[in-house]
Image (spheres, rainbow, N blue to C red):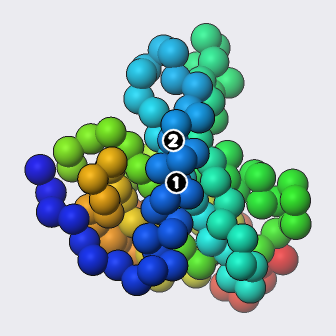
Amino acid sequence: MSEKLKVEPAIEEAYKVALKAQKNSYSPYSHFAVGAAIKFKGDDKLYPGCNVENASYGGTNCAERTAVFSRVAEKGYGPIDYVVVVANTDNPTPPCALCLQIMNEFCDKDFPIYMANGAGILKRMNFKEFLPYSFDTLKEGQKP
């Protein structure tokens, strides 16, 4: 099992939000409940998300995308400050490639992603470590 990281209080708060969101996961097919909390720059609110599965797997939505979409629905576009992802695994569980590609539209390439489980935050990595060659038709500085 990975060791728990010590993080600043704001990240610990986001972890608690992600853990709470994980409890709302609708995952009757995979039984793999995931929670997320995303902080956007210039916005004090933490946006929670959980995975919502569907019998038609293409209709399934991941926790990270749920959080991003919730922010967009409430306040529109904004750049991501950091993400916390919680899964019931011993080792850190990263966001899937589709979630990373969605985040790509909303981020600087250096923003941190924290991966956690029920015991605490296990690992911190920068976005660009996950997706160094993202598909991006917008040029740097061109984000809305």
| Numbered-mark total | 2
Q: Residues within 10 Å of mark 2 (few under 14, many from 20)?
A: many
Question: Which of 19/130 is in front?
Answer: 19
Q: In this view, does 18 lie to the left or right of 92?
A: right
Q: Is residue 110 above or below residue 69?
A: below
Q: Residue placed at 72% from the left, 71% from the top?
A: 45
Q: Residue at x 59, y 35 (%)?
A: 24
Residue 7 shows in this picture:
yes
Of the pair 102 and 93, the residue shown nearer to us: 93
User: What residue sits right under mark 1 in the picture?
Assistant: 18
Q: Where is residue 84 in the image (x, y as percent from the top left)?
A: 47, 62
Residue 81 occupies which quadrant of the picture? Answer: bottom right
Residue drawn where x is 75% and y is 52% of the image: 69
Q: In which quarter of the image is the C terminus?
A: bottom right
Does 43 sit above or below residue 3? Answer: below
At mark 1, the secondary structure is helix
Please tell me which residue is depicted at 75% across the width and 79% down the height of the picture: 43
Q: How far apart are marks 1 and 2 (CA)?
A: 6 Å
Can I make out residue 58 in this image?
A: no
Tell me if label 1 and label 2 are in contact, CB under 8 Å. yes
Which quadrant holds residue 2? Answer: bottom left
Q: In this view, does 55 lie above or below 50?
A: above
User: Circle 2 sits on which residue?
Assistant: 22
**Kind of residue indicated by mark 2:** Gln
Residue 119 vs 132, above or below: the answer is above
**Residue type for callout 1:** Ala
**Residue 42: where, in percent of width, then height?**
74, 85
Describe residue 47's horizontal placement relative to residue 95 as left or right: right
Residue 4, located in which quarter of the rendered image?
Answer: bottom left
User: Residue 141 at x, y = what percent?
Assistant: 72, 88
Q: Which SS class for mark 2?
A: helix
